[in-house]
Image: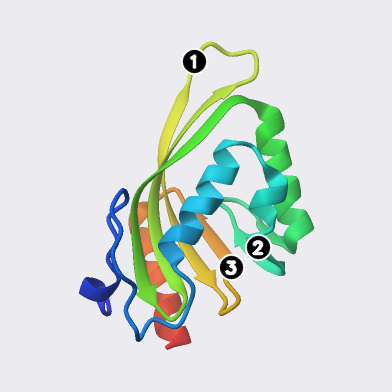
Amino acid sequence: MWPNAARHWEPLGYSSAVSEEHTTPDLVELSRQANDAFNRRDLDALMRLFATDAVMLGATNTYVGASAIRGLWEAWFDAFEHLHIELDEHRDLGNGVSFSIATQVARPIGSSGEVQQRLGFARVTGADGLCVRLEAYPEIEDARAAAERLAEERG
């Protein structure tokens, strides 16, 4: 189910040596950097982690290119007074593909209530360390299946 899971499992909050066989950048660290930039609302830092031709598959739309992805996140930041994503789990599946589970907590502008949801992400990172594809799913198992498929396709 998880190719090389023992070699690539990285519980958040812990660090381990990267395998000599691991030729792609540290996917756990890249996810942490992206998450930190997102939570700071630092779009410039966040976008430096994406290839210019990156693709993001969202729940309802597909965004092609860094400018389209940036536009999506700008709209999110404009809609929410508070928006925070906490990475709960991250797995490096090999071949530059990772699977993450995150909890998003958001408070829409003008609202006193918060919305919380868990999301699953499948991410493809190129050898240069830039994200080339990010898929977000409201159903964790859909994200897990997508990530496994992408890792197999790239193997």
Splitting the image into 4 quarters, where does residue 121 fall?
Answer: bottom left
**SS class, disc 2:** strand
Label 2 belongs to which residue? 50
Q: Rounded to the nearest whole Å, what is the CA distance between mark 2 and mark 1? A: 32 Å
Residue drawn where x is 45% and y is 59% of the image: 29
Q: Rounded to the nearest whole Å, what is the CA distance between mark 2 and mark 3? A: 9 Å
* Residue 142 can be seen in this image: yes
Residue drawn where x is 27% and y is 79% of the image: 3
Q: Which numbered mark, 2 or 3, is in the foreground of this view?
A: 2
Residue drawn where x is 58% and y is 67% of the image: 133
Q: Which numbered mark, 3 or 1, is in the foreground of this view?
A: 3
Label 1 belongs to which residue? 113
Residue 44, above or below 111: below
**Amino acid marked by disc 2:** Phe
| Residue 133 - label | 3
Residue 110, above or below 152: above
Q: Earlier in the sequence, mark 2 or mark 3?
A: 2
